[in-house]
Image (cartoon, grey):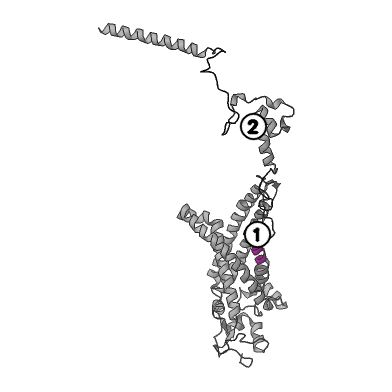
Amino acid sequence: MNRFSVSQSLKLLAAGWMLGAALSVIAQTPAPVAASPAVAPTPAKADAGGVQSANIFSIAPDANTDPKYADQNNGERSKVQPGNNAPMWRQVGAGVTGYSSLPVTQAPEAGNLIQPFVQYPGAKLTNAGEAWRQVRNNWIIPYGGALLLIVAGAIALFYWGKGTIAVHGTPTGRKIERFTPLERSAHWANAIAFVCLAVSGVVMAFGKFFIQPIIGTVLFGWITYLLKNLHNFAGPLFAVSLIIVFVTFLKDNFPSKEDFTWLIKGGGLLSEHEVPSHRFNAGEKVVFWFGVLGLGLIVVASGLVLDKLIPGLVYERSTMQIANMVHGVATIVMMLMFMGHIYMGTIGMEGAYSAMKDGYVDETWAKEHHELWYNDIKAGKIPAQRSSEAGTHSSTVSPSASV
């Protein structure tokens, strides 16, 4: 019984193998031309929707032997090599502008995918978008961040070695009005706006390197989104307050011959006695003219371009890229300069912060830090009390007060 079963199984397997071989031969035999209508191939409809793919076997591999192959447009190329859109993308890469139904006034570059080739300082010759990316990522971000850290470290080392510049003499109790309420209001509005812009700008530019790895992508994204909006709202406040600060403090910031002596001696910061100066010393005047006026105008103008707030300006990609690079460089230089100014106005000099907070300084402070200004007050050339709050500080210095 077992032998019969095994024999029958072997016969069945042999028969199955022979049947499979026969079917394979039949499948490889070409079908007759006069096929039944039921199995005849149905031609593709000309109006069939969807994306029509090309058969890779129907693309002629030797089509490039045509002498005019490199000069073919996209339509000509599709006839010999369907699906080969190299001519179109070659034009896109070369900056050729195509057709767009959008109005030119609203979208001047709507038909242009890739910008023409340019070479910005610090970038290779490449399309404008890639050149901007190279300048930002290879120069502005790494070197700007390094300079901010270097200056912050230098200030920390100076404070560690020098400490707060203290008043050496004994306070007299007689006060001099250094800043009027209008001057303090203008300064604080500008200072608060600057701090908001600086903090938000640093986080947006450098935060992904030192904040995102700690708090994660989601939280960093929300924080950056909020800071971006804070940046956009603080910008106009900074611009308006900058104008008020410039007009308010212009009169006392004109250069004088004593400023050259102050600059040559470095203000006497490394000695026991400061170099005599007027109401503002040469260092403060440099911050005023170069930082507030020069860099301030560049930062505000480039910021207005980035926010698209200048009427009549055509906001092309190249315009925004150049504005972004100028804005980044100018803001970093401004922050470097104002870091020293903030240091001297807070922990760097005793009495400097209270002068901007309350508006008054002791006559000993005025004599040690701004001796020429103090002498003009003693001589009656400048009033010791300039605002209408004369009754608030009855112990202000008068021209007849003793030195």
SS of the residue at dot 1?
Answer: helix
The picture quadrant where one finds residue 392 is bottom right
Residue at left 49%, top 58%?
Answer: 223
At x 54%, y 18%, the residue is 40
Does the segment drawn in magenta span residue 371? no
Indicate left or right for 21 with 168 as reference: left
SS at mark 2 in the image? loop
| Residue 265 showing in the rendered view | no
Q: Position of residue 69 (x, y in %)?
A: 72, 29
Q: Quadrant of the N terminus?
A: top left
Residue 100 in which image quadrant: top right
For the residue pair 32 and 147, the one nearer the viewer reads as 32
Tell me where the magenta segment starts and ends, as one range. 295-307
Position in image of residue 397 (x %, y %): 60, 89
Q: Counting other residues with Cα less than 10 Å from the Cα at mark 2, is it few (<14), some (14-19), or many (20 or more)? A: some
Quadrant the C terminus occupies: bottom right
**Residue type at the position of mark 2:** Asn
Residue with the mark numbered 1: 305
Binning the other alpha carbons within 10 Å of mark 1 as few (below 14), some (14 to 19) or many (20 upward) gives: many
Whole-percent x, y for residue 47 in the image: 59, 31
For the image, the number of numbered tags is 2
Q: Amino acid at mark 1?
A: Val
User: Which residue is label 2 attached to?
Assistant: 84
